[in-house]
Amino acid sequence: MKRSVLITFGCLALLAKPLLAQSVLTYHNAPDRSGLYVVPGLSLAAAQGMRLDTRFHAALSGNIYAQPLYWQAPGKKAGVLIVATESNFVYALNPDTGAKVWTTQLAPPAPLNVLECGNIDPEGITGTPVIDDVSGTLYLDATVLTKANSPRHMIYALSLADGKILPRWPLNVEALMNARHAAFSSTNRGQRSALQFFKNKLYVSYGGRAGDCGNYHGTVIEFTPQSRSITGSWATRAIGGGIWSQGGVITNGTVLFVTTGNTFGADRWGDGQAVVRLRPGLMGPTGTADYFAPENWKALDGVDADLGGTAAFPITVPTASGSVGRIIAMGKDGYAYVLNEGNLGGIGHALARVRLSTDGIKTAPAVYYGKNTTLVAFTNANGLTADCAGKTMMMLKVTSGSAPISVEWCSAFSGGGAPIITTTVGNGNPIVWIAGAQGDNKLHGFNALTGQPVFESNLALAGLRHFGSLIAANRHLYVAADGTVYAFTF
């Protein structure tokens, strides 16, 4: 059965909720980070009339790297747009006007001069928060400056009803980890990946900062919100191996997957450049079925060619008799790796390794399930064929055959945003939407089946950050930028 069917009919309730509800609770709208949104009425024809909504105006404090979220409380007709900034402000906005419903200012963010390295100044909330829809709680990691002038990672829980910090929060990550005799330093660990909420547990992943300073290890921590405690953690054995992709911890509805980056000075493989399966409780791999790393992992280490530039993601691929589960990993070496979801294969044993680009692949993809087809949209590519040379927006077709990846189409695009895909009800009218962050800074729409442009904004959107992802909610597309959010409607 296709993953889209699983989502539609609720066999996996956790994966179903983001598509069936109007809320956007997590990064790329689903725990598997598919980036798929169902928007009734947003047909290919309607997309051509997309326009900036001049009624919407949001004046916010701070730069924005995190994806916005959208929460519509059960039984309520209106929702709120949730935005978190590097200045440690969290906002709930009226989704039609941009007016502030509530504002919460957390502890001050950490200036760059108190960090060992980095390129975000100040550093506050970088990874996309996550919403527990049942309790109406927003969870986030914020880098804060303590009274002792030291940075600390703090986990906050906010009531979505009024933005108030819940009693006995935040949690000091460094103090809790050190109490478990697990080394953790906030000065050299960055938190860029989205948070994950899965089976009533909160998962937060950490890597390094720009410059790769200090002896950090890629780390995943499991928090149990009810007890406000750490109930599991996993870290790479070798130094480095940061978990810094936008998607962070990803789940197929049963287990968790993380993708690690390059390690430093490792003569023996120590969990870097890898896709790693983690079960709840964060028990690490018990055999080769639970991890994959390219055979040339050490060479990739030497040139900073992270496999973890994007998070490996689970997909379902149709077969003649049904479907199979696959994991797709894309690296900064320009290759895509196809893995068996149930048996990752160990070192060097991918089902397929296909070179897609002369450039590194570093932004989160989006997945579309059509009739007997699975398509994956991504950017930061530079196609190898004459038809795709210099065209950085690409769509892949993934099959279960002997050549499992092929290029369906490629299109000209300038920028470093992450794509999403919208469809109308019933998976019709698939459209790839992406912002040209730090390129042309325009919003673009492409026919997901052909690659033909269907929309390009006249306006260049100031303040976009690379890797940023937009969302679809409330009959709008929302694009976050430094100090504001742009809202497009149709």
Image: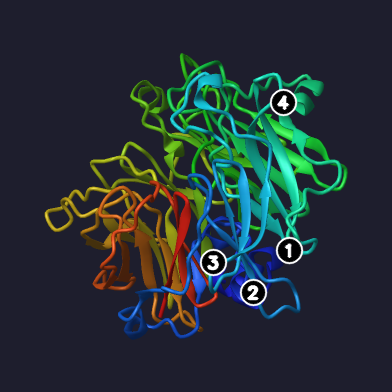
Of badges 1 and 3, nearer the viewer stands 3
The amino acid sitting under disc 2 is: Ala
Residue drawn at x 15%, y 51% as measured from the top left = 389
The amino acid sitting under disc 3 is: Gly
Mark 1 → mark 3, Cα distance in angstroms: 22 Å
Assign the N terminus to one quadrant of the image: bottom right
Establish if 89 lies above or below 150: below
- Can residue 160 be seen here? yes
Residue marked by disc 4:
174
The amino acid sitting under disc 4 is: Glu
Tell me, what colour scheme is on the image? rainbow
- Look at the numbered disc 1 and give the secondary structure of its residue: loop
Residue marked by disc 2:
21
- Look at the numbered disc 2 and give the secondary structure of its residue: loop
Establish if 244 lies above or below 92: above
Residue drawn at x 86%, y 46% as measured from the top left = 167
Residue marked by disc 1:
133
Of badges 2 and 3, nearer the viewer stands 3
Within 10 Å of disc 4 (Cα), the crowding (few <14, some 14-19, many 20+) is some
Mark 3 → mark 4, Cα distance in angstroms: 36 Å
- Look at the numbered disc 3 and give the secondary structure of its residue: loop
Q: Position of residue 414 (x, y in %)?
A: 25, 53
Within 10 Å of disc 2 (Cα), the crowding (few <14, some 14-19, many 20+) is few
Residue marked by disc 3:
98
